[in-house]
Image (cartoon, rainbow, N blue to C red):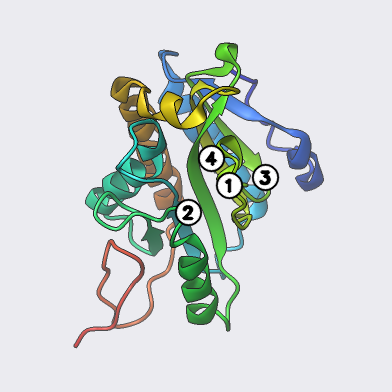
Amino acid sequence: MWNPLIKKNTAKNELLNFDARVHVEHPSAETIFGSNLGLFLVQLYNTASPLIILCIGTDRSTGDSLGPLVGSKLQDLNIPGAAVYGTLDEPVHAVNLQEILDEINIKYEDNQPFIIAIDACLGRSESVGFIRIKEGPLQPGTGVNKDLPNVGNIQIVGIVNVGGFMEYMVLQNTRLSLVMKMANIISQGLKKEIEKIKLPLPSNAVYSPVHEPISPL
């Protein structure tokens, strides 16, 4: 039901061919997800770069709500040093994705950020329920035939339902129970593994869980 954990001596370029995944119903799903995520971060992330978690999706569709649910959970968990984009209140979706990416590029033009991109996707019936981590950019919108910009240094996707036919209807009829389980595993795993890194906060900054650390008034 899941791929073996990445060995710590795995070469960085080998991660490109490694598809780390775990099924939500596995009794150790959170541990397996977190362990794989941690190894991806250790090998790929330079803590000198700002860390952004970009949660893509919309609360108007059950199947496509994984990203905003994760973003809102991360907002509540309050992870110091990580900037979160995409929540239930302020979703990042097909209409505003390019605008958000432009905002990020302007805000971090002096220090290239490391982006963890999160989204739901459709897949084969035997893959439904799996959460997958891969190196490289996410291609949002491919499951519903939308041409959106690729984004992310690491991608985390949850396979929420079967693709191939009437994708919009399938997303609308996806079980919320499955999406919530995925959101819990992803958000808890992100919190634990990012806190291990102990990201630095800017001096004299007050942490805002939405978007980024901000300076006090």
Provide the secondary structure element on which disc 1 rests: loop
- Residue 212 lies, with reference to residue 39, above or below; the image says below
> Residue 159 at x, y = what percent?
51, 27
Q: Which mark is residue 135?
A: 3
Q: Earlier in the sequence, mark 1 or mark 4?
A: 1
Mark 3–mark 1 Cα distance, whole angstroms, equals 22 Å
Look at discs 1 and 4 and give the one toward the viewer: 1
Question: Is the residue under label 1 in contact with that under label 2 (CB below 8 Å)?
Answer: yes
The mark lying in front, picked from 3 and 1, is 1
- Between 141 and 82, the one nearer to me in the picture: 141
Residue 85's spot in the image, x, y percent? Answer: 39, 59
Residue that appears at 34% across and 36% down: 61
Looking at the figure, which quarter contains the C terminus?
A: bottom left
Q: Earlier in the sequence, mark 3 or mark 1?
A: 3
Whether residues under marks 1 and 4 lie with C-beta atoms below 8 angstroms apart, the answer is no
Give the crowd class for mark 4: few <14, some 14-19, many >=20 residues within 10 Å: many
**Distance of label 4 from label 3 (alpha carbons):** 9 Å
From the top left corner, tell me how far across and down residue 156 is, in percent: 53, 40
Q: CA distance from mark 1 to mark 4?
A: 19 Å
Q: Nearer the viewer, mark 2 or mark 4?
A: 2
Res 146 label: 1
- Give me the residue at 61% from left, 62% from top: 46
Q: Which residue is mark 2?
A: 94
Q: Indicate which disc, 2 or 4, sits on the residue closer to the N terminus.
A: 2
Figure check: 92 above or below 36: below
Amino acid type indicated by mark 3: Glu
Neighbour class for label 3 at 10 Å: few (<14), some, many (≥20)? many
Residue type beneath disc 2: Ala
